[in-house]
Amino acid sequence: MTTPAHRGAPELTPAEAETVRATLPLIGANIDRITGTFYATLFEHHPALRRDLFNRGNQAQGSQQRALAASIATFAGYLVDPALPHPTELLARIGHKHASLGITPDQYQVVHDNLFAAIVAVLGADVVTPPVAAAWDRVYWMMADALIDLEKQLYVGAGVEPGDVFRRVTVTERADDAAGTAVFTVVAPDGADPLPYFLPGQYLSVGVRLPDGARQLRQYSLVNAPGGGVLEFAVKRVRSAAGCPAGEVSNHLHDTVHAGDELEITLPFGDLAVDPDAATPLVLISAGIGATPMIGVLEHLAARNPDRPVRVLHADQASGTHPLRDRMRALIGRLNAASLDLWYTEPTPGAHRGLLDLGGITFAPDTEFYLCGATGFLDAVRAQLAAAGVPARRIHLEQFTPTDWQALSCPV
C-alpha cells in the first residue's frame, strides 16, 4: 500500500469513513492474526528491532501484539463514531512511551509497510481492495501523524532533537528492601550536563546489554523529589510465574548493577503526572509495585506541598511483599494532612485483610484519584469508584502492561 496524497486531511472523507465502518468488524475479528503476522514480518525484515528495541517479554506473551491491535481499533472506532470518547489519553500514553524509547518519525513508515503487508496477507487482496486499502491507510497515518506531532512536542520540551534522549549515568547508591525492590540513584558523569527536572509520576527507560548481546529497554518509576541533578528509580525483581517470563532487564539490574557502575537511561517522560502545587485533595491507590510512582508523588509533596490533603490506599499480599513500605510510612509522617490505609491478603496487625475495598470511605467532590497496579486491580478499583459516583475525569491511572482491550495478567 502507498500513502495517499491526502494524508494530511483533518478527517476521513464520508466514503473512507463508511469503508472503515463496514470493515472494522472484519479487521477486529482477525486482528490477532494480523498483528501476529505483522510482528513476524517486521522482525524478519528488521531483526535489530526485536533484539534492541521491542520488549521481548511482552512479545513472548503476546501483550505487545494486543496493544497495537487495541490502539488502532480504538482510534478507528472514534474516527467513524465521534460520539465515542476522544482517544486523547491513549495517544498521550503511547507518545510518552515512544519518547522514552527514542522513537523517530521515520520508524512509522517501517511499521506502516509491514503492518499493511500483514493485513493483505491475512485478509487477501480480494478483500483488501484499493478503496479498503486507502481508507485504512488514512486511519494509520492520521494516528501516526498525531503521535509524531505529540512526540515532536515532547522532544522540544525536553530540549533535544527527536530520539536524542539517551544518557550515560553513574550509579551512586543502591538500596534494597525486603520486598525485592532495589532503588538505584544515578547522576550525570563528571563534565556532563546535570540530569533534568521531572514531574511526580513520571518514569525513565533503562537500557542494558544482556548476555546474549540484545539491548533491551524497560521503564521504571522515579521515586525521588526533583532537583540537584539526581534521579532515583525503583526496580522489582520479577520471577517467572503463571506463564509470564522472568523480567530479564529487572533481574539483570538486580544481579549486576551496584554503586560505581554506569548505566544507559533516557530523559524522564510520562503523561500520568501529578501537579505538585495543586491544593485539591489527592487519593493515591496502588497495588504491588504500583506503589513506586506513589512514592515519587509523596516525595514531591513532602518537598513542595506538605499541606495538601492526601490519602494513600495500598493493597499487597503481606507487609513483607509491600515495596518500599517503610519509606511510604516515613513520607506519610512528613505530611501534615495525610493518611495511609493498607489491605493485605495475609492477616497483619494494622492492615485490613483481603482485597482493597472502598466501601464506607467518603471522598470530597473535588478529589483527584491516581491509580497504579495490574490490570485486574485497576478494573476493580475503577468499578468501585464509578459505583461511588466519582466522575471518570477525576480518575487517572497507570498500568505496568501495554494498553490492551483485554485484561492482562502479567506485569512488565
Image (cartoon, helix red, strand yellow):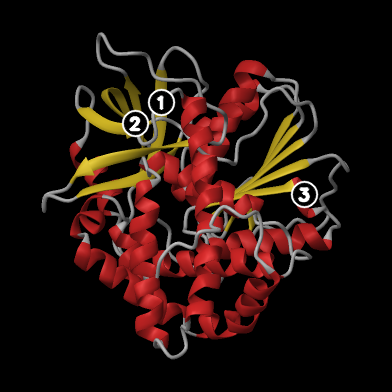
Residue position marked by numbered label 2 in the rendering: 164
Disc on res. 160: 1
Q: Is residue 291 left or right of residue 177?
A: right
Q: Secondary structure at mark 1?
A: loop
The amino acid at mark 2 is Asp
Note whether 144 is above or below 148 in the view shown: below
For the residue pair 156 and 236, the one nearer the viewer reads as 156
Residue 358 picture quarter:
bottom right
* Residue at far bottom of view: 126
**Do the CB atoms of the residues marked 3 and 2 lie less than 8 Å apart?**
no
| Residue 326 in view, yes or no | no
Residue position marked by numbered label 3 in the rendering: 393
Q: Residues within 10 Å of mark 2 (few under 14, many from 20)?
A: some
Q: Residue at x 46, y 46 (%)?
A: 97
Q: CA distance from mark 3 to mark 2?
A: 33 Å
**Do the CB atoms of the residues marked 2 and 1 lie less than 8 Å apart?**
yes
* Residue at far top of view: 191
Q: Is residue 23 left or right of residue 260?
A: right
* Residue 328: image location, x then y, percent: 55, 34
| Residue 333 in view, yes or no | yes
* Residue 231: image location, x then y, percent: 41, 24
The amino acid at mark 3 is Arg
Q: Residue at x 40, y 45 (%)?
A: 105
**Do the CB atoms of the residues marked 3 and 1 lie less than 8 Å apart?**
no
* Residue 256: image location, x then y, percent: 18, 39
